[in-house]
Image (spheres, grey):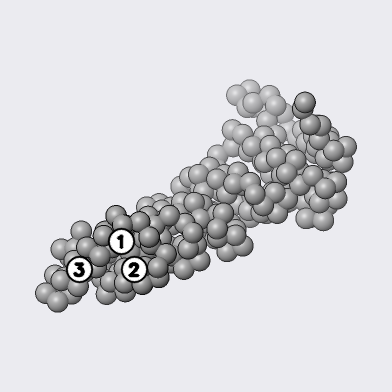
């Protein structure tokens, strides 16, 4: 049987739609090519207290409505024209309403993080980093995505290493490949002494238990030590 949204949530959504209609009523007539039902881009997020009051104890439903509002209001608008400060506020509000949902973080990294603007990408990565700090055990996949975005989209190796280091230190239950990400980033940075220290720390931690992962780290550690002793840093793969 389908579950109905609380009356407060329905009222909130209706109020938002009414506000959008009022804005359209006073806005200039759009160009012929503009979408007929286009909504203005997202404005400042509602206060957390107001969202919680409207949810009437059903935070997940309120969070889904927040995400629906974002997807409806940014449809057809270039990402570079959106206010990413407002977006970050709405995404964090949705996450506060439903901490178990990954949808706000997936949207931050994979949708809004796809913009060709480093400053806006960094705002979205900040959303992910703060969320990860609050719940590393559940949100480590989003932190992996943030590290990869920092590495490949921003080409900010220091930031990528910071995210990967947080994964290694704060998410001991994440799979071995996620906690080994810092090792590969350090090798890309040619910081092989640090990479050797990370490989040794992972082995000594006791959290790497699969024999294949242990063998990989031991092999990588030997290669790093060999490169350090021969001064051939660039030859480690």
Nearer the N terminus, badge 3 or badge 2?
A: 2
Where 110 falls versus 125 (above or below)? above
Q: Distance between the residues labelled 2 and 1?
A: 7 Å
- Choose top left, top right, bottom left or bottom right for residue 63: top right
User: Image point 20% across, 68% down: which residue?
Assistant: 222
Q: How far apart are marks 3 and 2 (CA)?
A: 12 Å
Q: Which quarter of the image is occupied by the N terminus?
A: top right
User: Image point 51% across, 52% down: which residue?
Assistant: 142
Q: Is residue 92 left or right of residue 19?
A: left
Q: Where is residue 118 in the image (x, y as percent from the top left)?
A: 47, 55
Neighbor class of circle 2 (other Cα within 10 Å; few <14, some 14-19, many 20+) is some
Neighbor class of circle 3 (other Cα within 10 Å; few <14, some 14-19, many 20+) is few
Q: Do the residues labelled 2 and 1 touch (CB within 8 Å)?
A: yes
User: Image point 50% across, 62% down: which residue?
Assistant: 171
Query: Which one is in front in this view, the residue at disc 1 or the one at disc 3?
Result: 1
Q: In this view, does 83 lie to the left or right of 154?
A: right
Residue with the mark numbered 2: 203
Residue with the mark numbered 1: 214
Q: Position of residue 158 (x, y in %)?
A: 39, 67
Residue 119 can be seen in this image: no
Residue with the mark numbered 3: 222
Q: In this view, does 185 lie to the left or right of 95?
A: left
- Choose top left, top right, bottom left or bottom right for residue 147: bottom left
Nearer the N terminus, badge 1 or badge 3?
A: 1
Q: How far apart are marks 1 and 3 (CA)?
A: 12 Å
Nearer the N terminus, badge 2 or badge 1?
A: 2
Q: Where is residue 121 in the image (x, y as percent from the top left)?
A: 50, 53
């Amino acid at each position: 049987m389908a579950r109905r949204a609380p009356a407060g949530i329905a009222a909130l959504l209706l109020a938002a739609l009414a506000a959008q209609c009022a804005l359209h009523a006073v806005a200039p007539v759009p160009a012929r090519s503009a979408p007929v039902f286009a909504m203005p881009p997202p404005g400042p997020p509602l206060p957390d207290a107001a969202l919680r009051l409207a949810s009437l104890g059903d935070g997940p439903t309120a969070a889904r409505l927040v995400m629906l509002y974002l997807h409806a209001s940014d449809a057809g608008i270039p990402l570079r024209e959106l206010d990413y400060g407002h977006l970050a506020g709405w995404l964090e509000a949705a996450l506060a309403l439903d901490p178990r949902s990954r949808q706000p973080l997936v949207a931050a990294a994979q949708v809004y993080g796809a913009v060709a603007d480093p400053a806006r990408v960094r705002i979205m990565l900040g959303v992910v980093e703060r969320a990860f700090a609050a719940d590393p055990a559940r949100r480590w996949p989003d932190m992996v995505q943030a590290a990869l975005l920092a590495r490949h989209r921003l080409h900010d190796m220091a930031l990528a290493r910071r995210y990967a280091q947080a994964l290694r230190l704060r998410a001991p239950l994440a799979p071995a490949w996620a906690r080994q990400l810092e090792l590969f980033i350090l090798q890309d940075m040619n910081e092989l002494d640090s990479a050797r220290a990370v490989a040794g720390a992972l082995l000594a931690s006791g959290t790497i238990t699969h024999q294949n992962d242990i063998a990989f780290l031991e092999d990588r550690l030997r290669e790093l030590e060999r490169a350090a002793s021969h001064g051939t840093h660039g030859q480690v793969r």
